[in-house]
Image (spheres, grey):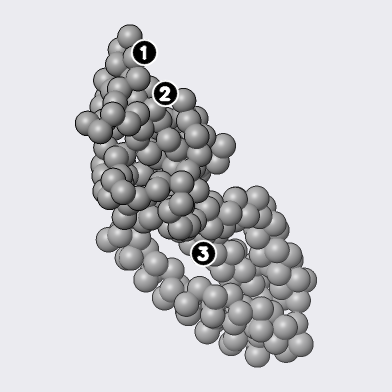
Amino acid sequence: MKNLLFKSIVVCILMLINANEASAQGILKKLKKSSDKVESTDNTNNESADTTGVKQLNWEMVPKYHAETRPITSNDGTPLKNEDGSPMVCVLLVDQFDNVRSADVVKEQHKKLNQYINNILKEVGKDAAVGAVTGLAAGKKGALIGGAAGVAHGVIASKDDIKKARELKKSLKEQEEILAKYQKNFTSEGTPIDASVDISKIDGLEIKEGVSMTAEALKAELASIPDDSNWNLEEIKE
């Protein structure tokens, strides 16, 4: 809907530049009416779907997960063994900050991140459309050119966020594929569902080699609730 409105704005700008004043004002009124209707609909949907406002992510602190082996030891550092005498090794989801998370926690983080990203992209699109209508309000050729420039400026000002949001959205899709393969092959504690499977040969799941950790530390990390405030979310729009 917003894309259609934006395209209509561009067409109307060209029409208004070449139209006489009376004709231009008529086109402008129709455009303003359509924009108000879209804005009203957006506000209604926003109130019912998300009242927290759009947030600005601290992109550098957003966790990105991979699968990693972790040999398990006792508190004194002695390697633990399985019943068959083989070393106890868990495969876990670990982020770039070396935090171990359960699959359920990762899912919840992805859900929040996708919501934030979608809100940012939605807000950028809405602001561009509203900015164009505002620029057209004077109904004169000079104002129309200035309005078009204003739309361009709004898009340029948000270019970095748009780029990062799209990059993160792509990254999340890749991580969700990793998560799906992980859950298909491993329990919530990181042990193989099928003990006979060679974990180094699971199709489509790259597993990195990690450092050892104690069984006590593993239990505590998997049970922990991460503090996502280190993403430093800052309100940018109500």
Residue 178, given in percent of the width and then of the height, sits at 43, 53
| For marks 2 and 3 on the same chain, the one whose residue lies earlier in the sequence | 3
Task: Kindly identify which residue carries mark 1.
Answer: 77
Residue 67, given in percent of the width and then of the height, sits at 44, 42
Can I make out residue 147 in this image?
yes
The answer to whether mark 1 and mark 2 are in CB contact below 8 A is yes
| For marks 1 and 2 on the same chain, the one whose residue lies earlier in the sequence | 1
Residue 227, given in percent of the width and then of the height, sits at 36, 30
- In this view, the mark in front (1 or 3): 1
Task: Give 157 or 80, whichever is nearer the viewer.
Answer: 80
Disc 1 and disc 2: Cα gap in Å?
A: 9 Å
Residue farthest to the left, as pictured: 83
Looking at the image, residue 77 lies above or below residue 51: above
Can I make out residue 228 in this image?
no
Task: Kindly identify which residue carries mark 2.
Answer: 212
The three-letter code of the residue at mark 2 reads: Ser
Secondary structure, mark 2, is: loop
Task: Kindly identify which residue carries mark 3.
Answer: 126
Residue drawn at x 34%, y 14% as measured from the top left: 78
Residue drawn at x 26%, y 48% as measured from the top left: 193
The three-letter code of the residue at mark 3 reads: Lys
Disc 1 and disc 3: Cα gap in Å?
A: 56 Å
Q: Toward which corner of the image does residue 150 lie, by quadrant?
A: bottom right
Q: Is residue 101 left or right of residue 98?
A: left
Task: Give 95 or 121, whichever is nearer the viewer.
Answer: 95
